Every structure is written in C-alpha cells, then in structure tokens.
Image (cartoon, rainbow, N blue to C red):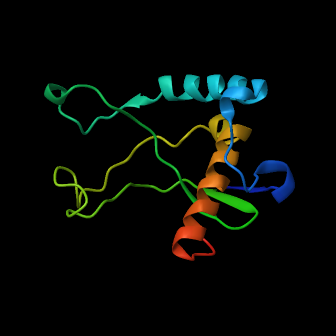
Amino acid sequence: MRKRMKFSRHGIFRNEFMSLETQEEDRIQLGELKKHFLNLSPDPYLDQKFGERYRAHSSAVISDSEITWIQPDHFLQKSSENKLFGGLKRKFPPVSNKMLDIPVLIKTIFDCREIYCYLFGETDL
C-alpha cells in the first residue's frame, strides 16, 4: 500500500529550527503523536527477559516536496547493524495512517531531510 502526499514548501517546513514548545498547535499535535506511540504493538521478537519494546514499521521515499509512504512486507537489518536480529526478516504492523498525517510529524521529517541533505549533499532520500 502506498500513500502519496504533496506539501508546499512554504506551508510545511522552514529553514529555521522549529520551536515546538512555543506553538500551541504543535503542542496539541505532539500530544496526538504521543498517543500513537503509546498504542504501538509489543515487539514479538524480543525475549521478555530483556523487558518490553513496542514497534510499528513503515518506510518512506522523501523528495523535496513529497513523502511516499511504503508499507513493506518485512523489516530487515544487516547482521553488522543488529547483532541480535540482523539477517532475520521481521514483520511489524504498519505505522497508523492517522499518525502519518499529523502535520508536526511531517514538518519534522522535512526539517530532518533538509539537515541531512545539507550535511551529506543528497537530494532524495
């Protein structure tokens, strides 16, 4: 399943750092975002002796003005990146569409994209 969203550069993100603490609408949206994080599903791969961990997984292709959400059928890391579960195809529920539509999350993704592209000279992620 793919979900395409287009955003005006002027309406969604800025070249300055966001001051989320001072913007009431952002605080409300952050509260909504927190609710989604508190409702993630338990990670079925982690042994309970290590405690609890909660997961959801979605991927995205991010260009200058668009995010294309991709719901992959599995999550895979290299063994060098994850000594415990590297090389294992894991399945997690997708990130909720309602969460993916929260404007403060979208602003944060685009702001992080700008910083990454500036630091590493990339144009698309």
Q: Position of residue 41 (x, y in %)?
A: 42, 29
Q: Left or right: where does residue 40 sit relative to residue 18?
A: left
Residue located 45% across and 55% down the image: 73
| Image quarter of the C terminus | bottom right
Q: Nearer the viewer, residue 28 or 52?
A: 28
Q: Quadrant of the N terminus?
A: bottom right
Q: Position of residue 45 (x, y in %)?
A: 25, 39
Residue 3: image x %, image y %?
69, 54
Compared across the picture, whether 25 is left or right of 122 comes to right
Query: Is residue 37 at all visible to an observer of this figure?
Result: yes
Q: Work out which residue is located at the far left of the displayed protein and give it.
A: 49
Could you tell me if residue 8 is visible in this image?
A: no
Pinpoint residue 64: horizontal percent, then vertical percent: 72, 67
- The answer to whether residue 49 is above or below residue 87 is above
Compared to 37, does 110 lie above or below?
Answer: below
Quadrant hosting residue 69: bottom right
* Residue occupying the point 57% across, 22% down: 35
Q: Is residue 9 left or right of residue 21?
A: right
Which residue occupies the foreground of this view, 118 or 103? 118
Which of the 4 image quarters holds residue 86? bottom left
The total number of labels drawn is: 0
- Name which residue lies at 67% across and 55% down: 110
